[in-house]
Amino acid sequence: MTILQSENVSFRYHAPWVLMHVSFNVEKGSFVGILGPNGSGKSTLLRIMDGMLTPQEGRATMAGRNIRTMSRREIARRVAVVPQDHGGIFAFTAREIVLMGRSPHLDPWAFEGKRDYETVERVMAQTETLGFADRSLDQLSGGERQRVLIARALAQEPRLMLLDEPTAFLDIRHQVEIMNLLKSLIKEEGLTVLAVTHDINLASLYCDRIILLDGGTIHAEGSPTEVMTADNIEAVYGLPVVSGNHELTGRPVIMPRMKE
Amino acid sequence: MSSLSSWSIQPVTLGRVFKICLLLFLLFFTVSVVSLFAGAADITFLTVIRDLLPLGADGHKALSPAEKSILFSIRLPRVILAGLVGAALSMSGVVFQALLRNPLADPYILGISAGSAVGAVTGILLGAEVLILGIPGMAFLGAILAVLVVFGIAGTGRRLETNTLLLTGVMVNAFFSAVILFVFSISDHLQLQRAIYWTMGDLSLADDQAIMYTGFFLFTGMAFIYRYGRSLNILATGEETALQLGIPVRKTKIILLTAASLVTAAAVAASGTIGFVGLIIPHILRLIVGPDHRILLPAAFLFGGAFLVCADTMARCLVSPAELPVGVITALCGAPYFLVLLRRRLSS
């Protein structure tokens, strides 16, 4: 079942087009990665799929509905966005931040109830953030903060999660932990994930499908084996590479050619 | 799953809000009673109690008519107005800080008080019935003008950096001060003294009308602002995040800014530009009750009220029988406090 669809989307901020005629489908319960060099329109595409930006041409639809016709509240009940990172300003604790994820389900006046606190407890256990639940966000490391933001997204109980470089600034262990977490949420909760990432190899290992953007158009789209070829990567990044295969999964692994 | 009772931090509930408000209300009440009996004329609490009792053997009431008048016609309105103005300034400080995502924002520093003052001074000098608005109405227009300038510079979505905030405040203040001086220079002496007092921040003009106006605008504004307590929490973490969590950011911001301007204008129309209350009070309270606006807003309301009653009592008593404008006291405490905060922010 298609949960999210981009139909012939073109977008520009001012003069040059950032995205041109971009079309793809995201199936329910899949892990889709958006790859591409800097300035290829990855983040813009993500913001269009969340309704933060409206394309000049084409449309983005969620379960068949044009996102433009949905209120922010309706969108927030279905889609959670994990931003790159954000520091704390007013010393909200990790738990208070996660609790904010309940907002789309609450009346403006209402205080959080038992069910909200239980949800927060559950998602914080899932993301292993309970250990520092009562520390303020600016006292946490980058990896801890990122997990708190994922917990907040989960507290929204979304069907779809959009992530903008979820593993940037994280060491390899934390990167893998976050990818494993996303994978298990897809498996256990039927979540759908669309993630912008710079990490070619992690994307190859974890994603079901990959969209490779280049200069605002889709250069290749398909399974990692179809997309992650040395030819595609060389063409898009302008970098000579060699490809191999992951020993356990057989997924493609891409490494730069070293200069002798 | 661990049980909720194991939490080291209590969740925000209506019960907890009431508990904190009750404590702060008791503080506010105590400060007000003490203030009522402080001053040049020596009236004690006991005299008042005795006055309330049936007539003594000598057939005299314990309070003389003059004392009664000092207590109920001079001091009481002043204490009430100080409470209202303090509440208004610290509450609008909380709102501006959350919306600009900078804890140094304060209606006085941002120039919003000065904007109100321009409106009000113009109102005083042109005669209060200008455009059927009256002085509070003119002050409101001035406040809105300043808010448009400040938030125009802050732009949408971004957080207002401390440097920008301070520079904007300096410039907005400079401009409105120039306008006020211009208005002074073309006005005659009789109205001038009242207007000058007023720009220094002064509660000595407290009367029933000022109390009614301020109270009405303050409670109206508070009702609108408190409704958005939870939204303010989320807005304080960023506007994009707020949108992604389903908050209609534009509409919420417009309502909050209008309400906060109204509340600031009410305070300024009644008492002139009293600085730093909106900075000190929210800062202290965040350390005590935490950053959640559903607690912070009513707490700032009560604690801000208590603070200004206290400051005004000092203004009345320090150089007794003369009086200082209360704005002098708040600036003497507030400006050093601000500098310490600024230094800490810049070094971190």
Image (cartoon, grey):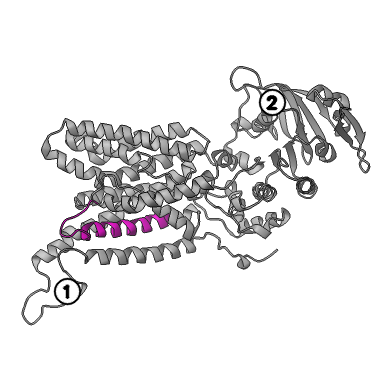
Residue tagged by mark 2? A39
Using the image, name the chain to which the residue with label 1 belongs: B
SS for dot 2? loop
How much space separates mark 1 and mark 2, taking CA atoms? 79 Å
State the image quarter where residue A46 is shown.
top right
Residue B164 shows in the view? yes
Foreground residue among B110 and B50:
B110
Residue B232 shows in the view? no
Q: Quadrant of the C terminus of chain A?
A: top right
The residue that appears at 72% across and 53% down in the rendered structure is A127
Left or right: residue B66 compared with residue B49: left
Question: Badge 2, how many Cα within 10 Å: few under 14, some, many 20+?
Answer: few
SS for dot 1? helix
Residue tagged by mark 1? B47
The residue that appears at 73% across and 37% down in the rendered structure is A195
Q: Position of residue B260 (x, y in %)?
A: 38, 44
Q: Main secondary structure of the magenta part?
A: helix
Question: Badge 1, how many Cα within 10 Å: few under 14, some, many 20+?
Answer: some
